[in-house]
Structures are given as C-alpha cells and as structure tokens.
Image: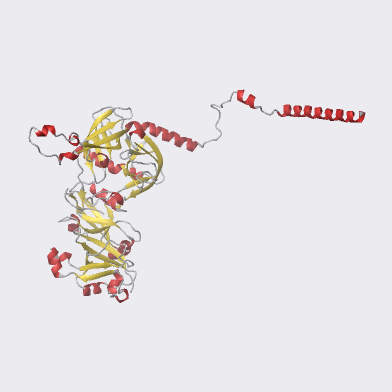
Amino acid sequence: MADRTREWMKFGVLVALAVVLALVFAQAVDFPRASAAQQRPVALHVGERPPVHASEAAIALGDAFAQVAEAVRPAVVFIQAERRSEPRGRQLRPQLPPPFDEFFRFPEDQEPRIRRGQGSGFIISEDGYILTNNHVVEGADRLRVKLLDRREFTATVVGRDPDTDVAVIKIDATGLHAVTFGNSDELRIGEWVLAIGNPLGEDFSFTVTAGIVSAKGRLLRGLEQPDRSYRIHDFIQTDAAINPGNSGGPLVNVHGQVVGINSAIASPTGFFQGYGFAVPINLARTVAEQLIAHGKVTRAILGIAIRAVEPEDAAYVGMDSIRGVVVEDFSIPNSPAKEAGIQPGDVIVEVDGQPIEYVAQLQQLVGFKRPGDRVRVTVVRKGGERRTFTVRLVAREEDQSAVAAAGGEGRDNRPPYEAKLGLSLEPLPREVAAREGLSDEQIGLLVTGVDPDGPAADKAIGPQQIITHVNGQRVRTMADLEAALKNVKPGDVVSLRVYRPQVDSFGVVRLRAGGQ
C-alpha cells in the first residue's frame, strides 16, 4: 500500500513540473493573445519610406501626366448637340375646318422630337473659338457647351469640313484657357500621349486616359463615304482609351501640347478595344484657320483620281520600294495635270522635292496650297523613266465628284490571254456602246467574268467593266488583246486601263500574269 502511495506522489510531482515548464516556455516565447491583440492600437506607418522604390523615370512620367492633365483639362469642353425633327403626326394630321380643328388635338403634334448627342472639344483661343469634330456638331439645331468650371454657354458653328471631320464652334466668352499646339509631323510611334474628353456622356466628363502612339497615316475604310472622294484619311492611331463621347477632345503629348483630335475607334462593340484614332493637329489647324477666316475650306487640286501604290505598280515602273500614288484617271475636264503631261498609270513619287509615301500625304501637300500655285510633280513610268512636270493648281469645285481617292468551267480550254489575266472577255457590241452612249475612248473589251483563283481575283476589276488599254496598247478586239500580251510571260506585271461605267470613271489595274 505504501509503495502505491509513493508512486502516485512521484506522478503528481512530474505533472506539476511539466505544467511549470510549460508556463515558463510560453512566457519566454510570448505568444500573442487574442484579447490583447484586440485591445492593442494598430500602428499606421504614415510618411515612412515606401516598400517599393520607384525609378526616377517612372516618377517623372507620373508627374508629367499629372501636370499635363492639370494644364489641359481647363481647356476641354463638353458639347451637347440637339437635333430636332418634325413631329410624327404632322404629316398625317387631317386638315379640318374650324371649329372642328379646336376639338381634335394630336399630342404628338405639340412638340418636335429632339435627339441629343454628346461629344468633346477644346478651346483654341481666349475669346471662345473651340475645335471639335464635324460629326459632333453636324446637323445640330442647338449646341450647349459646358466648361470644367461648370459654366455653360450656347455655341454657334463657325464652319465645318466633312472631308477632314474638323469643325470650329464659338462661345461668347473672354479670358478663357486655351491649349498649346504641338507638331504632329514630329510625333513618333511609341511616344506617350494622353486623351482627354467626355466618354460615355456627362457622368464621365473630363476624363484623362494614357497610352502611346501606335501608328501614323492610318486609312479607316469604315469611315469612307462614297460621295466624298475628297475625304482625307491620315489618322494617328493610339491605344489611349477613346470611347463614344471622346470625339472632338484633344490628344496631348507629355509636354502638354495638342497633337491630334480624338475622332474614332475601331471596335465591333462600339466601345474601346485598344484602337483609337485622332486627326493630326497640323491638318486640323490648317482647316481651322480657313474656317475661322472664311467659314469654309478652299482646296487646290491637280485634277486627278489616285490610289495607293501596290507591289505590282512598283514592279511595273521599275521601283525598288513600294511608295507613292498611282494616277488612275483625270477627274475634271481640262485637268491641269493632263495638260502638263501627266498620264494615267504614272506613279507620283515627289511634289516640290518632297517624297510622297501615301495618298493622304499627297492630298494634304496639294490640297492646302492656293489655286493658281504651281507645283513640280515627279512621276515614274514604265522602265524606270523619271519625269518632272510643272502643274498649275485649280480650285476644287463643290460639285466635283473626285479629285483624289482613293467562273471555272472550261478552264483548261481557255485561250492564253484569259489565263494570263484570269478574266473572261468579249468585244463590246456596237449596239451596246451606242445604247449606253459610250465615247470611242470608253469602248474596249467587256469583262464578263473573273476567275476567283486567277491574277485579277483580288484586284479592283469586275464584270461589266471595260478594258481599253493593255500595257499602253489600245484594245478593241480579241486580236488586239492577243497582240498586247504576246510577249508577256507568267509573273510579268500587266497594266490595264479600265473604264467603269457604273461610276463613269477610269482606273489603272496592275496584276502579275498567270500561266496556262
């Protein structure tokens, strides 16, 4: 019995010793207790050195963005355009004699329908001139302009130019904050820019977004209008976020200078997806100066229809680089370019010694000179012949339509000329030419089909067009065509002059000859 009592006493001593050691260990380690943690105040390390050390370049860029936004936002305006249409019931309202007309009231007749559109603009002078897009104000019956300081004004339209999508409006105010213009010609791809405007309406007004210049000299085919072949496409592309409502706002560089007017986005949804476009400010500024001075834009023209150079054009005239513009036709009677000696098919590579790279560049170089000015136009012809002509520019007529623009059955039995061109052709019947009132210049070989796998498949040529010349030779019969193609080998570039009756104009198509 005594032995058992001694064993229990030893066990109790060991347990007590274990408890004591545990308490000592816990006190030494100092585990936090929940109650203490809840009562202890949280220390906020305000003003201490940040855990991430930003580079001086990143800090400078952030400061630049903030300074630009602070400097430019006061010059940006919100524009609301009201467009009124006739009441729905007015056309259907019966003409009742008095006094019956007093008893029959049609609610839809009482007020016209009003549609409201929204956009942006920016102040370019202290006395209230504002630059914006034509499509923001076109057709507006009333324009409301709101400034950053919440003042509101009614604006009047000074002038519009649909061909460049530029407009100038004015408010009755003085002492306004105006922007500073930059030089869009010196803008570099990859350069930082900010877009400022009013995306998605008044709730998001005076928003600033940042991005880079993604490209220059963009042609937006979706914005082309068939009745506006004078339209100049020379857009700056940026990935700075631009949304509906940003149109007309400024695109600004890191120096706070305006380099473009935000104008369009490329998006299947109608909202920003990384592709925004702006009108270069050098172009817009030239237009604005004319609109302010005269209320309209007067352009000079060469009297030609043009298109971009393709690889076949460069090969045909023996150029190493693919640049310049192709003369397709003469757009007006007594074309000054024609009188000077320029011919359809010529590739224009210089104007007054300045190299020409693309269509919009030529349009701007020529279009904003004065009618009566003389320009030296350098062209390249077949064989690498290089010639320079002096052309006296004329004024564009408002009603002119163009100045510068822009089957397998029996396949193995096709004659050589059809295989080389990928076209089905037949002489134009005399009775058809007489019935359509075609001149001798417009008569040739009628295109009746285009081989979908042939050389002409992706060219601007189709059924019911008429080929009048092949490699500079006149063709009216199949024998003429065979003679013109006699020495053409597969892979050679063939030049076709094509008359398009549907639009009453000539064009130049160049393609590489196919084989048998």
Can residue 255 be seen from the camera position used here?
no
Q: Which residue is drawn at the image coordinates 19% and 68% (left, top)?
A: 444
Residue toward you, 113 or 407: 113
User: What colour-coding does the image apply?
Assistant: secondary structure
150 sits left or right of 466 in the view? right
Residue 15, given in percent of the width and then of the height, sits at: 81, 29
Instruction: Quadrant for residue 434, please give it.
Output: bottom left
Above-or-below relation of 391 to 44: below
Residue most extreme to the right: 2
Instruction: Quadrant for residue 108, please give it.
Output: top left
Residue 43, given in percent of the width and then of the height, sits at: 58, 25
Q: Quadrant of the C terminus?
A: bottom left
Can residue 391 be seen from the camera position used here?
yes
381 sits left or right of 28 in the view? left
Residue 131, given in percent of the width and then of the height, sits at: 27, 37
Residue 425, given in percent of the width and then of the height, sits at: 24, 70
Residue toward you, 375 or 146: 146
Number of numbered markers: 0
Residue most extreme to the front: 1
Q: Quadrant of the N terminus?
A: top right
Residue most extreme to the bottom: 413
